[in-house]
Amino acid sequence: MFYLKQITWYKSFRNNFLINPNRLLAFKATIVIGFLVILMLSIGLPFYAVTLGLGALAGALSETDDHPNGRLKSMALKVVSFAISSFSVELLQPYPVLLAIGLAISTIVFILIGGISERFRGVTFGALLVGIYTMIGVQISPVWYLQPILLTSGAFIYGVFSYILLRIKPYSLLEEQLARGFSALSLYLNEKSKLFPSDANEEKEIRANLALLNVQTVEALDKCKEVLNSYSESLKNQKLLTPYLHYFMVLQSLHERAASSYERYDLLSSNPLSKELIGGIRQLLHELSHATQNFAKSLLTGCSYKHPIVLDWLVKTIDNLLKNNELEASHPLNLLIRNLKQSNTTIKNIYQNNNANLLPKLERDNRNYFERLKAQLHINHPRFRYALRLSISFLVGYAVSEYFEVAKGEWIVLTILFVLQPSYSETRKRLLQRILGTFLGVVLGVLIIRLFTFYGQILLMIASAYLFLLWMKKRYSVGVVFITIFVLCAFNIIANKGVDVMAPRLIDTLIGALISFLVVRFLWPEWQYKKLPSLLSEVIHKNTAYFRAILNEYKQATTDDLAYRIARREAHRADNALVMAWQNMQLDPKKQQQLKNTAFTLTYLNHALLSYLSALGAHRTTHQNIETSHLLTFENHILKVLDKTCNWLTTQDNTDFENIEESLEEIRQYLVNTKEPTQMQTILLFNIAEVTLQILEQAKLFKLTVKFN
């Protein structure tokens, strides 16, 4: 192996393969599926071959990101739940009414159990999938108990193979999740570079794009935290996690600095004297984006990260430009450049400052399983509503299949499982992707299947499984094309009826998609504009908590800033929820988009507000107490105004609005007239007050439109 690593072409191929984590999942599953299919076909058992392959596929789709010890627990749960689900279908198949009732109840139970933790979510989805696979294969199964055994065995064999690979490289999941985080940050930095230069309209559009990219980055950070907690629970020696905790803290620090803003970018770009500096900042952000992406690749490939020489050259060039411009130390451009230089230093020295004796604490959900389950048990909880919608959709789909004797009607239920999502907008996107992918897969499959011999179809089926898993998360419609070809080959291998089942598959897909659409459209529809008031109230509440945490850090910095990090993360999660509401609103019916423009404005305004707070937080450890006098003087006043704003958003009473506006205006005017207008905190406080006032102006629009619950 060491010899191979020295060969140029092999090294290049290996690195290109490893930098896409989806390839490894697809490769693992394809190896197992290929082995099982070829082995069973070689001894003349085509039904065994396809059913074992489907079990392995279900196992791959339901795999969780756990420490190897956690993966064993997950595999045990998977085997038990898959067996229960599959055996139940076989036993109830002669009794359609009982099967329908069992399907409905088990769906609700599985979905709610999946809400307890990420581990349960993967396992319970797999159990539903295996149950439907069993329904599809009942008519061609030689004996009733064979499918449950084969499907469960296929998942178990895949689980064992995946576990062995994970044992060989036990920290690969941590490296993969951290790499996803650094890659998401790289995209954010690259988009932010477009702000230099920018005018007011360009800034608005770019900030909206940044808000969407911030969703990906924060989700990646949350996923990193979950996997780190999984490893922490399983390891006795916590110091083994030191480098990964260090990388995670670096990622959080870089994200905070990347999200920071000091002044409106159109104002900074308008000064002709700063033209060269603006261009330098753009290039510096662009190169920092490349650097974070390179570090992500180094985590995936195991190669050492090499810091780009061009970054140090850029920093020196920008320093020279700063000297020529003679900007004040607290000028926004100077502060921004200082921030970017710190980010460059952090990435450059990422392998240093790794103290095993200072392991940071991570946020944990300390509720027990019963408390987490109980929290979902009310009709207004999104997951409970999703469970009911999915259960009812399954009932309707199964009833249609049985009553009208639809050919291969079980595919209606399978389509519903993949298409129906928790929200209308997500369902609509998945619905179109599923229909398009199935249609293209049917057409392409029917056209090419006759070009392949029996053994060629085996290879085509295995290749389709790989391509489905590779594209499933990246572009679902493309993945559906390949899973359709997989199904065609499978039926050809079992009974030479692959082409015959393609028309029923397309029809069943359309029926399942229609049922999913009607259920999510008319059963507890959650139109995004109705969520805006509560989302904005939550945003202001979390931003206030973040601001309070920043002030506490300015007063007295702590060695363990867990409370600060939690407050910051919750502010970003609230911002993400607001961003997704705007994004999803664009797919709602036209008459439900009445506040689309307001939602867009709130999205970029709140992201701007969060960026000013991030800038304030990013400098919390670099300023002496004497420099924070203005900040602390306004502490109580600003917090009171923000609290009043939050209360105003959650009530019908509008009497406080003018008082809040006057208070914010007073803060702005004082900051404008202060004797130290160039102080960094003063500039940021002014912008925080300014943007909060703009958010309130937008809030007035929907307080007249939407009733508060």
Image (cartoon, rainbow, N blue to C red):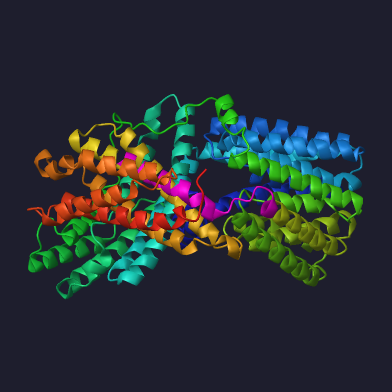
- The magenta region covers 520-546
Q: Residue 304: in sight, yes or no?
A: yes
Vertical relation: 178 (above or below) 71: below
Q: Where, by quadrant of the figure, is residue 686 drawn?
A: bottom left
Q: Residue 457: image x %, image y %?
A: 78, 62
The outermost residue toward the front is: 655
Q: Residue furthest bottom?
A: 272
Picture residue at 43% right of the left edge, 43% below the top? 650
Whether residue 525 is in magenta: the answer is yes
Query: Where residue 380 sits: x, y (%)?
Result: 59, 39
| Predominant secondary structure, magenta span | helix
> In the shown orientation, is residue 461 left or right of residue 354?
right
Q: Residue at x 42, y 51 (%)?
A: 217
User: In the picture provided, is 267 more to the left or to the right than 192?
Assistant: left
As drawn, 104 above or below 685: above
Quarter of the image for residue 268 reads bottom left
